[in-house]
Image (cartoon, rainbow, N blue to C red):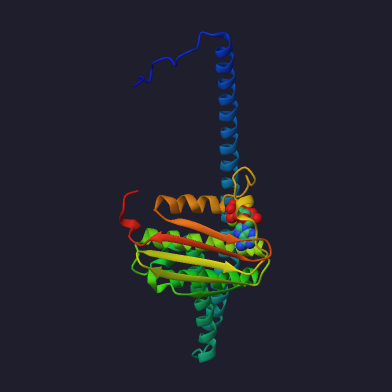
Amino acid sequence: MKELNETPDIPSDKAQLNKYAEDLSRLYILEKERRKELETLALEMSTMQERERGRIADQLHDTIGQSLALARVKIGMILQLDRAPKKDELMGIDELIQKTITSTRNLLFEINPNVLLELGLTDALEWFAEKTHEKHGLIIDISGGAEADILEQSLKILLFTGARELLTNTVKHAQTERAEVIVERSGDNISVKVQDHGIGFNPSERLSRSSNELSYGLFNLRQRLFLKGGSLDIYSSPGNGTSAVITLPAGSGTRRN
Ligand SMILES: Nc1ncnc2c1ncn2[C@@H]1O[C@H](COP(=O)(O)OP(=O)(O)OP(=O)(O)O)[C@@H](O)[C@H]1O
Ligand SMILES: [Mg+2]
């Protein structure tokens, strides 16, 4: 075996030497491209984080901040009264506080869906379905989910984030109003199927890295599933909708991969 500090074998023959130089410059160019790719990715990520922070700040101000301020105004008015507050006056304040609790919970789950997953995969999926419907109008039917309750948290997170990526793809690309999520247990495996009857696509064409440098979602998901011994199968063709199935061995969270 070669020592690390050993110099590589440099060929003596001229033709071989030329080839060696060509290989080296090709490697150099490749390395430069990789670096550039990484820089672009880092930049994209920091822009995304910046945008996300702005959105959270807006939500804190527009929903939580304003509801609390309004509740304070109402309490101030009641404090100025010479009589005991009426029931409906108190109910108005109660409603505002209830609204603030819901907004806080929504924001918390958006920032960290893992919190929600402690309640169960079904709750997390239903919450996401509700949010997606509010924002984009997509109707999402969910069946199953309790099967995942016994899974380790890291697996539930993977199933949830996987379903979220697939549903986000339905919103972005499928041009349809409905999607279905089916969670099933079969033998030692647990699967989450997301299907839509939208425009569909050609997976072998769209998912090759060279054809689609700006698409990372499915590629990343497939890598993450692979690390846990799972897989992602996509069945789709133009005009025939898309069905994507995430499969994970139910015990893989305890294995060291
Ligand atoms: N449900 C779907 N319906 C139609 N086309 C789809 C669907 N899901 C994926 N695609 C196609 O597959 C491509 C790759 O999807 P992928 O999730 O990897 O990337 P993306 O959604 O374009 O970008 P990213 O996920 O990185 O934000 C998409 O650009 C789209 O052309
Ligand atoms: Mg995507």
In-image side of 148 versus 80 (left or right) = left
Q: Is residue 90 above or below residue 29?
A: below
Quarter-of-image position of residue 189: bottom left
Asked whether the viewer can see residue 71, the reply is yes
Q: Quadrant of ligand 2?
A: bottom right
x, y percent for residue 206: 63, 51
Looking at the image, residue 123 lies above or below residue 227: below
Give residue 135's position: percent from left, percent from top: 63, 69
Residue 54 visible in the displayed image: no
Q: Is residue 107 left or right of residue 184?
A: right
Residue 72 drawn above or below residue 158: below
At 59% from the left and 62% from the top, the residue drawn is 168
How many marks overall?
Answer: 0
The quadrant in which the N terminus is found is top left
Q: Residue at x 34, y 57 (%)?
A: 253
Q: Looking at the picture, how far across and down is residue 211, in whole percent?
A: 65, 45
Residue at image point 63% right, 64% down: 171
Closer to the camera in the image, 54 or 31: 31
